[in-house]
């Protein structure tokens, strides 16, 4: 049981390098961005530069370095970046400034559960990516965020998949660890603190009045490859195969992460 939410002030720089500057990060960015393009179309904006009058209001909740929301901001949309870690916000602000996107951002130093205090109105789109697995009450946080989406708006949620975590431990033979309930191993500082059961996420969204529009498995096989020095492949082939398999079962439900997006019904 997680006692408190994880703050990345102490690991911000390491987190940035380990999560985003890797093959894992590139696969994640590629497949999730395909979904973001579908989300933008569903919200009635073209996936390209837009007129300011068509700009969406976007909340990047627990957004860290804002890798994906920067791509959205670069299209002309307005982003509020919220994070518990002041260090992560500082790194993000520098990167956003370097990318000449600062005019499209506002920064909120706050837990995601309290972000409503900093918003003047519900938003068109919320990104809630790779945050739930670090929270003491992940489903409660998700439920709170659903209240900040406009009717007709969309929430985009990516979470560390319990089924993927279980499968990884099974194929590695970690049966004693499984029988102990797969407690978080503190020696792996950047290993998420828990896996999230997909059904609990889907149920939370539906109970909050959302219609699920799409689901994607993020890294459906890459992380299960036992030896990346064996086999006959290129990294480009891995990315292409991940894109091919990520939205079909059974691969979708075995993704190390799952990305689900849903629209708030009237």
Image: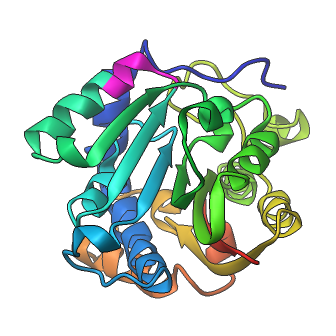
Residue 77 relative to residue 250: left or right? left
Please state the horizontal and vertical placement of residue 67, each as a whole percent of the image.
31, 49
- Prevailing secondary structure of the magenta residues: helix
Name, please, the residue furthest toward the top: 10
Q: Quadrant of residue 255?
A: bottom right
Q: Quadrant of the C terminus?
A: bottom right
Along the line of sight, the residue nearer the viewer: 72 or 150: 150
Q: Is residue 97 above or below residue 255?
A: above
Q: Is residue 27 above or below residue 94?
A: below
> Would residue 86 be counted in the magenta stretch?
yes
> Would residue 96 be counted in the magenta stretch?
no
Q: Residue at x 52, y 24 (%)?
A: 84
Q: Is residue 181 above or below residue 254?
A: above
Q: Quadrant of the N terminus?
A: top right
Residue 51 shows in the view: yes
Please state the horizontal and vertical placement of residue 140, each as a whole percent of the image.
81, 41
Residue 262 relative to residue 49: left or right? right
Question: How many marks on residues?
Answer: 0
Residue 10 relative to residue 47: left or right? right
Please state the horizontal and vertical placement of residue 178, each as a whole percent of the image.
83, 42
Residue 175 relative to residue 215: left or right? right
Q: Is residue 125 above or below residue 109?
A: below
Q: Residue at x 61, y 87 (%)?
A: 248
Along the line of sight, the residue nearer the viewer: 114 or 157: 114
Q: Residue at x 37, y 26 (%)?
A: 88
Residue 234 shows in the view: no
Along the line of sight, the residue nearer the viewer: 193 or 55: 55
Q: Which residues are magenta?
A: 84-89
Q: Residue at x 56, y 83 (%)?
A: 247
Please state the horizontal and vertical placement of residue 244, each as a whole percent of the image.
44, 87
């Amino acid at each position: 049981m997680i006692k408190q939410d994880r703050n990345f002030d102490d690991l911000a720089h390491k987190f940035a390098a380990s999560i985003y500057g890797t093959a894992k990060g590139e696969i994640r960015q590629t497949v999730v961005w395909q979904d973001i393009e579908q989300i933008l179309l569903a919200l009635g904006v073209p996936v390209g530069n837009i007129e300011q009058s068509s700009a969406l209001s976007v909340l990047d909740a627990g957004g860290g370095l804002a890798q994906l929301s920067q791509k959205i901001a670069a299209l002309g949309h307005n982003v509020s970046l919220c994070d518990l870690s002041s260090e992560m916000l500082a790194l993000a602000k520098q990167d956003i400034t370097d990318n000449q996107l600062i005019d499209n951002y506002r920064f909120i130093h706050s837990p995601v559960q309290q972000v409503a205090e900093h918003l003047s109105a519900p938003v068109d789109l919320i990104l809630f990516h790779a945050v739930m697995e670090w929270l003491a009450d992940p489903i409660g946080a998700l439920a709170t965020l659903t209240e900040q989406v406009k009717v007709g708006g969309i929430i985009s949620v990516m979470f560390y998949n319990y089924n993927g975590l279980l499968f990884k431990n099974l194929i590695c033979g970690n049966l004693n660890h499984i029988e102990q309930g797969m407690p978080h191993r503190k020696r792996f500082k950047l290993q998420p603190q828990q896996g999230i059961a997909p059904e609990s996420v889907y149920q939370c969204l539906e109970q909050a009045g959302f219609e699920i529009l799409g689901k994607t498995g993020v890294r459906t096989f890459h992380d299960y490859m036992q030896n990346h020095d064996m086999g006959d492949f290129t990294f480009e082939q891995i990315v292409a195969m991940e894109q091919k398999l990520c939205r079909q079962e059974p691969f979708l439900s075995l993704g190390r992460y799952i990305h689900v997006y849903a629209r708030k019904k009237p």
